[in-house]
Image (tube, rainbow, N blue to C red):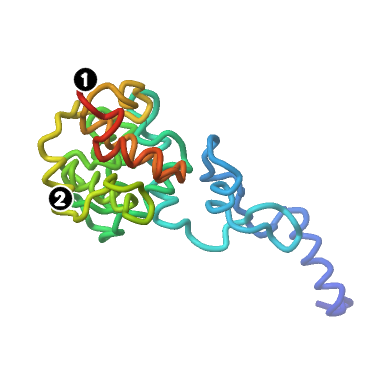
């Protein structure tokens, strides 16, 4: 290239990049955040701000619970909501085993994630499978309930308001009537008879509200979740 120095060639290339707008791709930090989540939950999904202070550019894939909770909160809403909010889902999710990415059944997060992703197409079928109970697909309802009931122990709950073993919990749970279509926003679940739905609601509240002293007695069936 006669008459051109190395520096002029470099300048020409830089000018072309500017004209063609060949800037490195950036990920919008808002993608994947739930509108209803707390600032803490949003940061968990988005990652830390970059060095230039441009907001939450993800630095690693979202955690399994973050993926699951985002999917179930977006796919199961209103009467089919399985958790009261994103924070509640994240708190309860921590109690379930991850399982394998290939899970289509069993009491695991991966199984629940699979059906949470399908929920928008048919929420009445998939939401309870994706929910904390599992509804016979991602574990039996009692398996889901008793997994969460490990939050109620001699140390965290008042005397007698916990199950001494998983076997005791399962035996107690198996005789409970349930609606078969659990919804976290159903106000009747807060205390209208000794039902599976009432118990599941209150063990979730014990975990998400960090208030085992209040909610474990309801979840174990000693108060509120009782037949009058």
Q: What is the count of numbered marks?
A: 2
Question: Looking at the rendering, which quadrant does residue 181 occupy?
Answer: top left
**Front position in the image: 192 or 184:** 192
Disc 2 versus disc 1: nearer the observer: 1
- Return the residue at label 1: 228
- Return the residue at label 2: 168
Q: Position of residue 187 (x, y in %)?
A: 36, 22
Question: Looking at the rendering, which quadrant does residue 130 occupy?
Answer: top left
53 vs 218: above or below: below
**Front position in the image: 30 or 69:** 69
The disc placed on residue 88 is none
Tell me the residue at 22%/50% (across/down): 163
**Would residue 140 be found to the left or right of residue 67 on screen?**
left
Q: Quadrant of the C terminus?
A: top left
User: Tag 1: Cα neighbours inside 10 Å, few (<14), some, or many (≥20)?
Assistant: few
Q: CA distance from mark 2 to mark 1?
A: 24 Å
**Would residue 34 be found to the left or right of residue 215 on screen?**
right
Tell me the residue at 64%/53% (across/down): 56
Tell me the residue at 13%/53% (across/down): 167
Q: Earlier in the sequence, mark 2 or mark 1?
A: 2
**Would residue 142 be found to the left or right of residue 183 on screen?**
left
Badge 2 marks a residue whose secondary structure is helix
**Looking at the image, can residue 197 be seen?**
yes
Q: Position of residue 77 (x, y in %)?
A: 39, 28
**Front position in the image: 136 or 196:** 196
């Amino acid at each position: 290239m006669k008459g051109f120095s190395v520096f002029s060639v470099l300048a020409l290339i830089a000018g072309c990049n500017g004209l063609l707008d060949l800037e490195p791709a950036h990920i919008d930090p808002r993608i994947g955040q739930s509108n209803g989540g707390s600032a803490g939950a949003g940061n968990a999904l988005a990652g830390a701000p970059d060095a230039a202070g441009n907001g939450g550019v993800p630095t690693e894939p979202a955690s399994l619970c973050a993926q699951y909770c985002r999917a179930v909160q977006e796919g199961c809403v209103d009467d089919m909501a399985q958790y009261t909010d994103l924070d509640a889902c994240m708190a309860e999710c921590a109690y379930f085993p991850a399982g394998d990415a290939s899970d289509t059944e069993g009491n695991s997060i991966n199984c629940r994630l699979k059906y949470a992703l399908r929920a928008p197409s048919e929420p009445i079928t998939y939401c309870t499978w994706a929910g904390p109970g599992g509804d016979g697909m991602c574990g039996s309802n009692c398996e889901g309930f008793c997994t969460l009931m490990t939050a109620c122990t001699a140390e965290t709950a008042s005397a007698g308001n916990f199950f001494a073993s998983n076997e005791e919990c399962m035996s107690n749970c198996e005789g409970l009537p349930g609606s078969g279509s659990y919804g976290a926003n159903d106000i009747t679940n807060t205390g209208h008879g000794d039902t599976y739905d009432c118990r599941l609601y209150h063990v979730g509240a014990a975990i998400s509200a960090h208030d085992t002293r209040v909610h474990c007695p309801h979840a174990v069936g000693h108060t509120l979740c009782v037949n009058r």
